[in-house]
Image: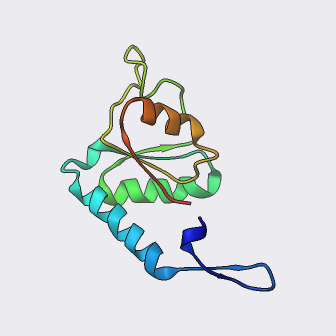
Amino acid sequence: MERYVFKHRTDGIYVTNLGKTWDKLMMAARVIVAIENPKDIIVQSARPYGQRAVLKFAHYTGANAIAGRHTPGTFTNQLQTSFSEPRLLILTDPRTDHQPFKEAALGNIAILVNI
């Protein structure tokens, strides 16, 4: 994360480099737009504060939302009824959503994480 820090103030606050952050946001937007069918996108959050954003994003874009606990094997176990193979997985917190992160990496699914 150091490359996105513009400077560190004496009171302990880090100032974000808006130019680099904007470039990464534009790249993420290009990735999302490149997917033809919005149903191939899964937006997921286990944190209560991210669940509302996930549901709103899915509502306005037509993507699939998983708000709440992740069911293990959703992206890897084909025998499971909730199995899905999306082209893109968008997560809100990599620490809380570490299980879907690992499963998507095993299945070669593109991942975007918004911290």
Q: Can the viewer see residue 69? A: no
Q: Residue 60 at what x, y percent from top left?
A: 34, 60
Q: Is residue 85 above or below residue 6?
A: above
**Nearer to us in this view, 48 or 20:** 20
Q: Residue 94 at what x, y percent from top left?
A: 58, 48
Residue furthest to the right in view is 11
| Residue displayed at 38% across by 73% down | 23
User: Quarter of the image containing the C terminus?
Assistant: bottom right
**Nearer to us in this view, 6 or 85:** 6
Residue furthest to the bottom in view is 10
Q: Is residue 7 above or below residue 75?
A: below
Q: Residue 45 at what x, y percent from top left?
A: 54, 48
| Residue displayed at 60% across by 68% down | 2
Q: Is residue 89 left or right of residue 49?
A: left
Q: Which quadrant of the structure image shows residue 85? A: top left
User: Quarter of the image containing the N terminus?
Assistant: bottom right
Q: Is residue 91 above or below residue 4?
A: above
Residue furthest to the top in view is 79
Q: Is residue 8 above or below residue 1?
A: below
Q: Is residue 33 left or right of residue 71?
A: left
Colouring style: rainbow
| Residue displayed at 38% across by 53% down | 58
Q: How many marks?
A: 0
Residue furthest to the left in view is 36
Q: Can the viewer see residue 54? A: yes
| Residue displayed at 41% across by 67% down | 24
